[in-house]
Amino acid sequence: MAKTLTIVGLGGSLANVSTSRAALQLALEGAATAGAETQLLDIRQLNLPMYNPDDDEPTETAARLIEACYAADGMLWSSPMYPINTMEFATRALRAWAVPYVVPVAAAARVFDRMGQIQDQAVELQLKTLGGEVVRVAERFVTHESPDHETECARAAERVATAA
């Protein structure tokens, strides 16, 4: 890889111990292992304001989010289960390519302990594999090695699904 890719993780929840954030951190570890530089944008720490069309300039934290996302070669998003489809719709509205696979963490209370530490090695492997696949696909997109983005995304989904 000629250029170090940047993968930004965005998500979590407002809980002090967020399993969404813990899952995102594992996926970012997978991206880092694959050679990317990573950055975590924790939704709780960002404390983003509600959108106000009368504001001429974004707040400092909104500007940080915008700049990090703009500079990213790839992104990993994580949230509680209920808005997953909404996130996919948002991705498509932004004309972005989504690796067509999610790693749902069913029964998160059993997968992560009370401190947010992973307890399920199969889920850990899937999350880290997802991070690595985002790097692999982003590298192909950046270098234009594969003009068939849909095929690359499908390959990534298959690799993550079989990582257990």
Image (spheres, grey):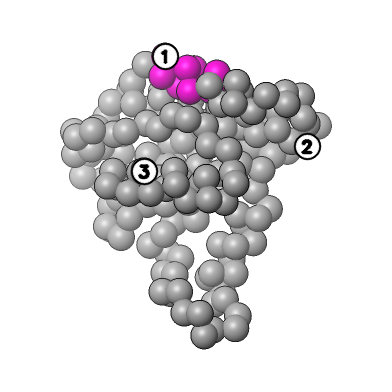
SS of the residue under disc 2: loop
Q: Which quadrant of the structure image shows residue 49?
A: bottom left
How far from the left and from the top, in percent, is residue 131?
51, 32
Q: Secondary structure at mark 3?
A: helix
Q: Are marks 3 and 1 in contact (CB under 8 Å)?
A: no
Q: Amino acid at mark 3?
A: Asn
Q: Nearer the viewer, residue 93 or 109?
A: 93
Name the residue at 33% across, 22% down: 121
Could you say which is closer to the camera, residue 102 or residue 68? 102
Q: Nearer the viewer, mark 2 or mark 1?
A: 1
Q: Amino acid at mark 2?
A: Lys
Q: Residue at x 59, y 44 (%)?
A: 96
In the rendering, at what x and y percent does residue 103 appear?
A: 37, 31
Report if residue 157 lies within the magenta region: yes
Earlier residue among tags 3 and 2: 2
| SS assignment for the magenta stretch, majority | helix
Q: What is the C-alpha distance between the residues marked 3 and 2? A: 32 Å
Q: Quadrant of the N terminus?
A: top right
Location of residue 2 with respect to 57 vertically, above or below: above
Residue 98 in picture, x, y percent from top left: 53, 37
On the image, numbered disc 2 is attached to which residue? 3
Extreme residue in the right direction: 2
Q: Are marks 3 and 2 in contact (CB under 8 Å)?
A: no
**Residue 162 has which mark?**
1
* Residue 97 visible in image: yes
Name the N-terminal-most of marks 3 and 1: 3
- Give the number of the disc on residue 17: none
- The label number, if any, that marks residue 85 in the structure image: 3
Specify the segment rendered in magenta: 155-163
Q: CA distance from mark 2 to mark 1?
A: 28 Å
